[in-house]
Image: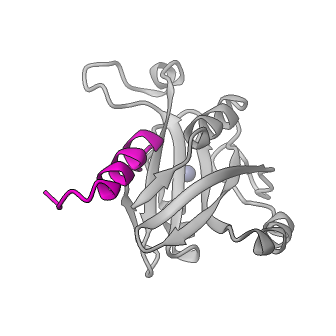
Amino acid sequence: MITLAAGVHAAVVAHAQQSPSIEVCGLLIGTRGPDGVTITDVHPTANVAAEGCEDRFTVDPRVLLRLEEELEPSGTELVGVYHSHPRTPPDPSLLDRRNAALWPSFVHAIAGRDNGDPIAPTGAAALRCRPLVVRWYWSDSGGVLSSAPPCTPACSSLSKASKAAGSPPS
Ligand SMILES: [Zn+2]
């Protein structure tokens, strides 16, 4: 299960909103436990893709290494990566699926244009005006991506409360 601390979802949306044409990207920081991954912080990075940031992203590997070192004493670690699709829905592209194979057991979040309304007009021009939504995915140990709707702060405090109350599983 993916659990989001307060502000994580909003931080990804806010970063994606800054860039209407070029993909943004960043790293997700948190902890891994028996219940899955908890994301506590968002670290925006530059997109250093060598060819065309409009439809691809590359996290600066130097930032990645530095952050891993910085995080070590804090007890948190890199648990995921996010990027935006400024003009298309938040569905993983073929390239995204290939990239996910390089980041197994990782959270992959994509901020893209909401295509959830089946009667709304589609097409590039119509999509541009749609709100940005974030979809969350998990890459298994083989790097295969699957959709993983996260638990928000509200639902995690609810499950903590029910555990504290000792209520049996329903
Ligand atoms: Zn993508």
Which image quadrant is residue 123 in?
top left
- Residue 80 % position (x, y): 59, 62
Where residue 24 sits in the image (x, y, percent)?
70, 44
* Span colored in magenta: 149-170
Residue 74: image x %, image y %? Answer: 76, 68
- Seen from the viewer's position, the closer of residues 64 and 75 is 75
Q: Residue at x 52, y 59 (%)?
A: 38
Left or right placement of residue 61 versus residue 28 in this view: right
Q: Coloured how? A: one colour
Q: Residue furthest bottom?
A: 142
User: Which residue ends up furthest to the front in the rendered image?
Assistant: 165
- Residue 92 visible in this rendered orientation of the protein: no
Identified at 35% across, 19% down, the residue is 121
107 part of magenta stretch: no
Work out whether 42 lies above or below 31: above
The quadrant of the picture occupied by the C terminus is bottom left
Picture layout, residue 139 above or below residue 123: below
Which quadrant of the figure has residue 7? top right
x 53%, y 47%: residue: 110
Along the horizontal axis of the image, is 2 left or right of 15?
left
Residue at the extreme left = 170
Pinpoint residue 155: horizontal percent, then vertical percent.
37, 44
Quarter of the picture holding the N terminus: bottom left
State the count of labels: 0
Q: In the rendered image, is residue 33 in sight?
A: yes
Q: Quadrant of residue 145?
A: bottom left
Asked whether 37 or 114 is in front, the reply is 37
Is-magenta flag for residue 151? Answer: yes
Q: Residue at x 71, y 39 (%)?
A: 22
